[in-house]
Image (cartoon, rainbow, N blue to C red):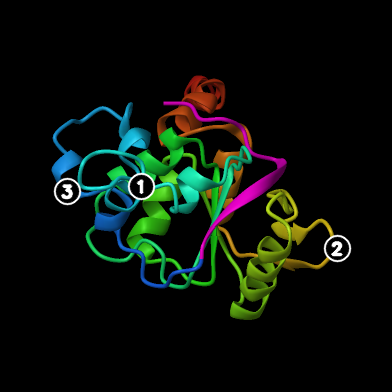
Amino acid sequence: MSFEKFEVRVSTIKVLPLENIDTDQIIPARFLKTTTREGFGDNLFYDWRYNSDGSKNESFVINSVDNGAKFLVAGRNFGCGSSREHAAWALYDYGFRAVISSFFADIFRNNALNNGLLPVQVSDEFLSKIFSEADSDINAQIEINLKERSVKILSTGEYELFPIDDYKQSCLINGYDDIDFLCALKNKVEDFENRR
């Protein structure tokens, strides 16, 4: 399955300044009964987004802030808990293309990268700067430059570099999953075989 290419993106942000957001909070287990990726965005953060009667919780940031954000900014240790890939599916299906935090659970990070979602790990200090910027401006914008591996607060020009595996960086820039990457090498494989 191909994903949107990610090179340089500028977006507003939605902020969840909570630590230890686990995969059951991202997508509750009762919604894991399907094997296709579509529709998970509707249930993203379900128990926080909706009241017990099914009405929207208007105080929750996903519902209360309508700024077209493609980036989610969350507290430390995002995606901890169970290894469900559905958490990355839900975030991507909702429309997020990157999550910024000061620490990601390893399994979540890998699931995100395998599903077109960029986990941007920054220092606690830089994360605090982003939170402060969002507090002062609901439409604060962040630039993520995947080629340079940098994340920047546009209003101040402050930026930080983030780590990413070379292979996964290449896949995200090209919009590839692992199968797309192999298919893109088909001609090289055939040339190699023909030269043997």
Q: Residue at x 62, y 37 (%)?
A: 68
Q: Indicate which disc, 3 or 2, sits on the residue closer to the N terminus.
A: 3
Task: Tell me the amino acid under the disc marked 1.
Answer: Arg
Q: Is residue 55 magenta?
A: no
| Cα gap from disc 1 to disc 3, whole angstroms | 15 Å
Q: Where does the magenta region start and end? A: 1-16
Task: Give x and y (percent) for residue 192.
Answer: 52, 27
Say which residue label 2 marks.
157
Say which residue label 3 marks.
29
**Viewer-side residue, 53 vs 132:** 53
- Residue 110 sits in which quadrant? bottom left
Say which residue label 1 marks.
49
Task: Tell me the amino acid under the disc marked 3.
Answer: Ala
In terms of secondary structure, where does tag 3 sit? Answer: helix
Q: Is residue 40 left or right of residue 94?
A: left
| Cα gap from disc 3 to disc 2, whole angstroms | 40 Å
